[in-house]
Amino acid sequence: MSASSSSPLYRLELGLRRVAGWLLAALFWRPGRGGLKRLLSAPARVVVVRLDHRVGEALLTTPLVGALSGRAEVHLVVHPKCVRVLTGLPGVAAVHPFERRWLWRGLLSSQVRALRRLAAGGVVVNAANWSTHSGTNALASRLFAPKACVVGPAAPPARYLMDVAVEPLPGTDSELAQRLHLVSPLVAKPQGAMAFRAPVATPKVEAFVSELNGPFAVVNPGGRLAERRVPPSVFGAACRRLREKGATPVLTWGPGEEPLAREVADQAPGAVVAPPTNLDELAFLMKRAERVVCNNTGPMHLSVAVGAPTVALFYQMPVSRWGHQAAPHRMVDLTPCAGEAEMVRAVEAAL
């Protein structure tokens, strides 16, 4: 996003998007497509579209693959930055990168034409935001599907670009549950879990783990949005508690976050700063760790996807929507805490 979700600039941006969404809905609304619903019973293939560039959003799409497994050939259309996240995922026939700028070229784009051929005779699932309008994803899904049935969220105005508009699942705001619910026209009571390919270890990360010579926990104090990160002192306390329990805290970090990792390590004797890691190396460390401690970020979803016991620290974000409540994971809501001391006590209790 270009601005904070509470700022006047963001609200203006959101309003302009909705106006554009209504114009596009009026332009591309095709009420005579009801006959395509027959494809829901036995689609040749299902094309899931999610054009967000964030790692966490890509991983939150993976449960749909599990839900659709065995029913159809599943293809994923994603932002080019997310191809590395979903390549090699079991149950996926192919991952197709799609640049948003290609969308505005319409049928002049060879990528658009190829995806229209792929989707023909099948179902296109618009796996966008289920609670608010998401115009780009809705328009792309419709453009890919002149001879396919389009399923997606009922949030207006994008709902008018869907052949089957899916109302939100009542009684929950869980992102995982709501995203799975998007394929309910294809699968009764869809079930699926976060997934990732088997992480490929490299000699560098294998040597690092060997040098630890014992149990370790991954601690990832970074995050994309600074205002939603828990203070470094809280992660320092978490590292000290992990050390008391016999695990070496391993501080992992993303681009530009190494100083933050070292700041936390300085507060916790015995903590170790990991070398730079790519996505597979980070996933390998998480899978081998006794537990993972992190903010509510993409690495949190990656940790859950590889099956690592995850302690996720939430600040200024709803746990009910973005958290993973099932064991062995623990979601810790630090938003109500009065200060860092109270945050520390809450995290120590969770560990």
Image (cartoon, rainbow, N blue to C red):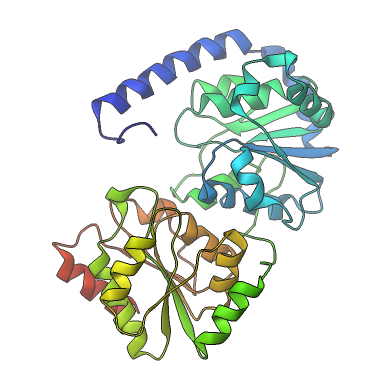
Q: Residue at x 61, y 73 (%)?
A: 204
What is the x, y in percent for residue 191? Answer: 65, 56
Circle count: 0
Is any part of residue 139 visible from this angle?
A: yes
- In the displayed structure, 71 sits above or below 335; it is above
Most foreground residue, 268 or 167: 268
What is the x, y in percent for residue 249? Answer: 40, 79
Is any part of residue 163 visible from this angle?
A: no
What is the x, y in percent for residue 138? Answer: 59, 26
What is the x, y in percent for residue 133? Answer: 47, 27
Most foreground residue, 34 or 212: 212
Q: Residue at x 35, y 85 (%)?
A: 270
- Residue 230 is left or right of residue 200, and the answer is left
- Residue 67 is left or right of residue 226, and the answer is right
Q: Quadrant of the C terminus?
A: bottom left
- In the displayed structure, 127 sits above or below 172; it is above
Q: Residue at x 72, y 56 (%)?
A: 89
Task: Say which quarter of the image contains residue 259.
Answer: bottom left
Q: Quadrant of the N terminus?
A: top left
- In the displayed structure, 14 sits above or below 227; it is above
Q: Residue at x 25, y 69 (%)?
A: 234
- In the displayed structure, 326 sits above or below 128; it is below
Most foreground residue, 31 or 90: 90
